[in-house]
Image (tube, helix red, strand yellow):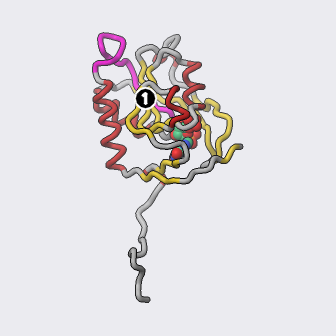
Amino acid sequence: MTRLPHEKGFHISWDQIHRDARALAWRLDGKGPIEGNWKAVVGITRGGLVPAMIMARELDIRTVDTISVKSYNHQARTEPHVIKPPQADIMGADGEGVLIVDDLVDTGRTLELVRTLYPKAHFATIYAKPMGVPMVDSYVTEVSQDTWIFFPWDMALQYVEPYRGTDA
Ligand SMILES: O=P(O)(O)OC[C@H]1O[C@H](OP(=O)(O)OP(=O)(O)O)[C@H](O)[C@@H]1O
Ligand SMILES: O=c1[nH]c(=O)c2nc[nH]c2[nH]1
Ligand SMILES: [Mg+2]
């Protein structure tokens, strides 16, 4: 296991990821290889499921599947492996026409593995770190490699002390 140093935190709200996933969908609209269309959206579980759903809704795509890849135990990186593949007839021989979506690309190891399986698919993530950029075809926002991205499903609202403290 490799534990990476993360100096900064980038905290994403539900509203932010909703807007970013929509923006990514709009950018890819009409860009599929089959008369501009995409034949399916495949989310890389688990993080890719929320953006995949939002993008499939925007692009009016009803064929939605998942590929389950596990690469991290909390913030510690492990060797990525496929736990559940998508349906073979959706992916075809090489993934052509399929939009494969994840929440982020970090080292690029997850997408590298999925790319070897489906080299002609289009790989889209909402966020990207520099090491992973070569592995992704489309993304919305880049953050530095030493930033840990906190997604809304991993957070909860909680009380914070006022900046000037309290009298108690
Ligand atoms: O570019 P990489 O360094 O491979 O990292 C990116 C991957 O890591 C996270 O998934 P994780 O394995 O933590 O599983 P999860 O989506 O179920 O949270 C994230 O959702 C990406 O899929
Ligand atoms: O929630 C997460 N934030 C990250 O920055 C990250 N990098 C890999 N996997 C990740 N998961
Ligand atoms: Mg993931």
Farthest residue toward the right?
Answer: 1
Farthest residue toward the bottom?
Answer: 168
Residue 160 as seen in the image, left or right of residue 46: left
- Where on the picture, by quarter, is residue 110? top right
Q: Residue 140 at what x, y percent from top left?
A: 38, 35
- Where on the picture, by quarter, is residue 103? top left
Q: Quadrant of the C terminus?
A: bottom left
Q: Residue 116 at what x, y percent from top left?
A: 59, 19
What residue is at 42 percent from the left and 71 percent from the top? 160
Residue 29 as seen in the image, left or right of residue 124: left
Give the residue number, with chain letter if any, for mark 1: 124
Query: Above or below — where is 35 with respect to 1?
Result: above
What residue is at 43 percent from the left and 29 percent from the top? 124
Of residue 21 and residue 86, the one placed in the foreground of this image is 21
| Residue 45 seen in the current view | no
Count of marks overlaid on the render: 1
Q: Is residue 43 magenta?
A: yes
Mark 1 Cα shell of 10 Å, populated few (<14), some (14-19), many (≥20):
many
Q: Residue 5 at what x, y percent from top left?
A: 62, 50
Q: Is residue 50 magenta?
A: no
What residue is at 35 percent from the left and 19 percent from the top? 38
Of residue 89 and residue 105, the one placed in the foreground of this image is 105
Query: Above or below — where is 165 with respect to 34?
Result: below
Magenta stretch?
30-44
What residue is at 61 percent from the left and 38 percent from the top? 71
Element type at marker 1?
Answer: strand
Q: Amino acid at mark 1?
A: Ala
